[in-house]
Structure formats: structure tokens, C-alpha cells
Image (cartoon, grey):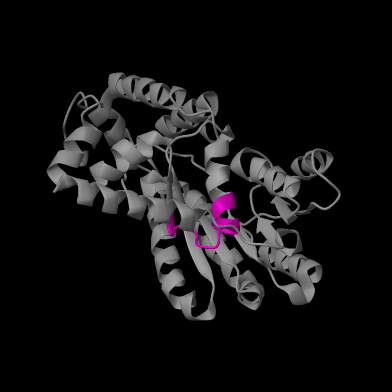
Amino acid sequence: MWLPLLLVLALILLYRWYRQSRLLENLTDKYVFITGCDTGFGNLLAKQLDKHGMRVLAACLTQTGSEKLKKEASSRLQTTILDVANTQSVKSAALWVEENVRNKGLWGLVNNAGIGIPTAPNSWLRREDFVKVLNVNLLGMIDVTLCLLPLIRRARGRIINMSSVMGRLAFVGGGYSISRFGVEAFSDSLRRELQPFGVKVCIIEPSSFRTPATDIQTTLQSLNDVWGQAPLWAKNSYGQQYFQDYCRFIEYRLSKCDPHIHMVTDCIEHALTAVYPWTRYSVGWIAKLYFIPVSYLPTFISDYLLAHPLKTPSRLCSPQENN
């Protein structure tokens, strides 16, 4: 009885492997525009695709990042300066892309640009702390996508949006998880909307990887700045000891970030070059074996698992008690 079932399962897995291993031809004719190429995933991806002969259009936030990337790549790779949070900058970059791709259209758009801080318990933050992250990670991504959509439709190409496991589970405060949940929603609606036009939309959901965005010292400095401007009632409620414990918790989590960032860029490359790309790429074993399964558990279980490592605030009291 079990032998036929195992045989069917083996055939399904073999077909699944064969289907996902099929790659497109004529990749050297395809243009790919990548945001956030100064460092991290974007920088590595630009050089990786360039080595495979694709026509990479890399957007950097700084002139220094742009010049450094050009020195490390072939003459095919071209760069431009882009601040995704600035609409005029986005429009200028879109015109630059159109001048480069012309009638071929844009095969791939990789919305990689993003920031992670400030991240802290929500009650320590101000409105502008949320706006700062949302303007880059969500609204900037939407702006870039809408400006380049005609070129992507012309090529019947691909849109690859960078999300995170924190787009499935919000286990820290601040704008980061909110922005990633927004990326998931925008990508889902966009995928269904563009399906009749032959455009595919893929979502990348990495766990924690070691990039400048997860730098320990930068993150701890941001936490100190946030705590310094937190409301008095929040400081009194949580207490200095909780703040120090929280910093140690964040430092520990960041110290465990995976240094093998090529795992993420390999998934993005597959999304761009495979005949049948995945809709979602959960990257990293901790994402596959912990965070994604936990996201399907009953809420009271996931709440316990995610909140348990944090200590209880020293004094549970209302804002009125501290006025």
C-alpha cells in the first residue's frame, strides 16, 4: 500500500524539481532594474546578474555607492542615483530606464531598497518614525513600480518585491513589519491584476541576514535615540532595566543573522530567470522551519512563542498615572 504512495510522491517531487529548474533563454537581451544597490542584497545581486550577462540597471542612493559598484562590475552594468522616498527622483530614474531599454521594455524590476530602523516598542516611537520607514519600504516601492509598469508590461516581464518573514509575523514594533505587510498586500493585488498581461509578481521573504541594515551598532544607537525621546509615561512604565534587556535581546538576535546573503540573491535570480518562478520565496532555514510554520499556529500560541523571550516591564501602569 505504501509503495505506490511513495512512488507517486517521488514522481511529484521529480516533476516539481524539473519544472523549477527550467530557465529562460536569451538572458543577455533582458534589462533588469534594481533599487538599493549601494550595499547588501542589491549590490550583490547587481554583480551576480551582470556576471551572467544580463543588462543590469542599478540604482544607488549615493554617488559613492554608484562609483564603487561600477568599478566592481563589467561595462554592461549602468548606474543611476535614486531616492525611492522622493517622487521627483523616482520619475527621473524612470525616464533614465526608458532611455536605456527603449522598445525592448523592462524585463525585471527588483524593488530591493529598504531600511529597518527605527525599530522599538510602538509606544516609544513618534509618528515620524513610522513615516520614515513607510516612505522607503512601501510607498517608495509602490511609486517605483507604478512609474515603470508600462515598460514592464511591454516586455511581459517580472516584478520582484522584497518583503520579509516579518511580513507574515509582526514581532517587533515600528514601521518595518507594517511596511512588509503592505508589500505582501500590494504584491498580491498586483499579481492578480497583471496576470492577464503576462506579467509575474514574486515576493522574497528572507529571515534575518547579515547586511548593513542589520548592523548591531547602528541598530543599538537607533534604540538609544528612540528611548531618549520616548514619552515620560512610557519610560516610567517600562523602566530602564527593561530598556537594557530589550537592547540585549535585539543585539542577540542580530548576532545570529545569517552571513550567507547569496541565498537571498539566488532566489531573486531564480525569480527573474526561471520559466516558472515561485510566487513566494521564503529564504533561510529559520524562515522555513520556524517563522512560516508559527504564522499558521493559533494566535495565542504564536503570541506566547514570540513574546516569551522579552521580560515583563517593571511597572505596568497607565499614562495618566505618570502625568
Q: Considering depth in this image, is 292 or 239 the residue closer to the camera?
A: 292
Q: x and y percent of residue 52 in the render? A: 72, 49
List the single residue furthest toward the bottom.
196
Magenta-span inclusion, residue 158: no
Residue 271, magenta (yes or no): yes
The C terminus is located in which quarter? top left
What's the magenta region? Answer: 269-280
From the viewer's perspective, tell me whether residue 304 is left or right of residue 186. left
**Residue at 49% across / 30% down in the picture?**
219
Image point 53% across, 24% down: which residue? 217
- Outermost residue toward the right in this view: 75
Residue 242 versus residue 98 in the image, above or below? above
Residue 236 pos. (x, y %):
26, 28
- Write down the quadrant of residue 255 in the picture: top left
Horizontal placement of 309 versus 66: left or right? Answer: left
Q: Which residue is located at x 50 percent, y 62 percent?
A: 276
Residue 31 point in image, percent of width and height: 72, 62
18 sits left or right of 60 in the view: left
Question: As rendered, which of 31 and 121 lies closer to the eye?
Answer: 31
Residue 322 appears in the rendering: no
Q: Quadrant of residue 230?
A: top left
Compared with 249, 178 (above or below) is below
From this viewpoint, is residue 8 visible? yes
Question: Residue 195: image x %, image y %?
Answer: 47, 76
Number of numbered discs visible in the structure rendering: 0
